[in-house]
Amino acid sequence: MGILERLLETDMEKLQEREKKVFEVKRLTKILGEPFFLELHPLAQEQINHIAEISKTVDNMQNNTVLEGALLEGKRLNYDKLLQRFKVVSAEELIKKLFLPGEIYEVYKQINKMSGYDEDTVQEVKN
């Protein structure tokens, strides 16, 4: 059976399944005294397009990617109680207060990798 036939026979839901990963922010784990985990999800093309439209800088794009692809205990980082507790009006302000720049960048990289933006996602076959 060829790859085209296999593709045509494969369940569409299986093809569209998205992996999720848990990412620990070790600095916050140490501060809080218990594991600080973010659940990361890959982004769909529509989300990537939206982020590209609304982002004005590289930092803004990284922050928006984290906001779209990360959950904290099942809640998005624009969760009202978090914003109120940290006395910020936007989720972007929250992540700047909560995370170090390198932590934001690492989460951003993981989400991008899960979304297919990785060097070894597609590999050239040499004859």
Image (spheres, helix red, strand yellow):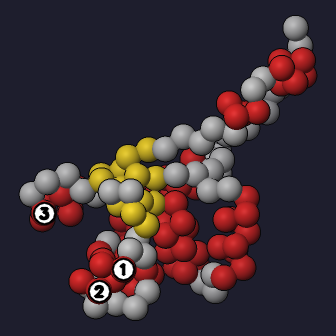
Q: Is 78 situated above or below 108?
A: below
| Contact flag, marks 3 and 2 (Cβ < 8 Å) | no
Q: Which residue is mark 1?
A: 80
Q: Dot 1, crowdedness within 10 Å: few (<14), some or many (≥20)?
A: some
Residue furthest top as drawn: 1
Q: Nearer the viewer, residue 83 or 62?
A: 83
Looking at the picture, which amino acid does disc 2 mark? Gln
Q: Which mark is residue 84?
A: 2
Figure quadrant of the C terminus: top right
Q: Which residue is mark 3?
A: 32
**How far, Cα to Cα, is label 3 from label 1?**
20 Å
Q: Residue 60's image quarter?
A: bottom right
Residue 30, given in percent of the width and then of the height, sits at 13, 59
Relative to 95, is 109 on the left or the right? Answer: right
Relative to 19, is 118 on the left or the right? Answer: right
Q: What residue is drawn where x is 68% and y is 30%?
A: 14
| Contact flag, marks 1 and 2 (Cβ < 8 Å) | yes
Q: Is 49 situated above or below 120?
A: below
The kind of secondary structure element at disc 2 is helix
Select label 3 or label 2 by which is in front.
Answer: 2
Q: What residue is drawn where x is 83% and y is 20%?
A: 9
Q: Is 77 situated above or below 42?
A: below
Q: What residue is drawn where x is 36% and y is 65%?
A: 103
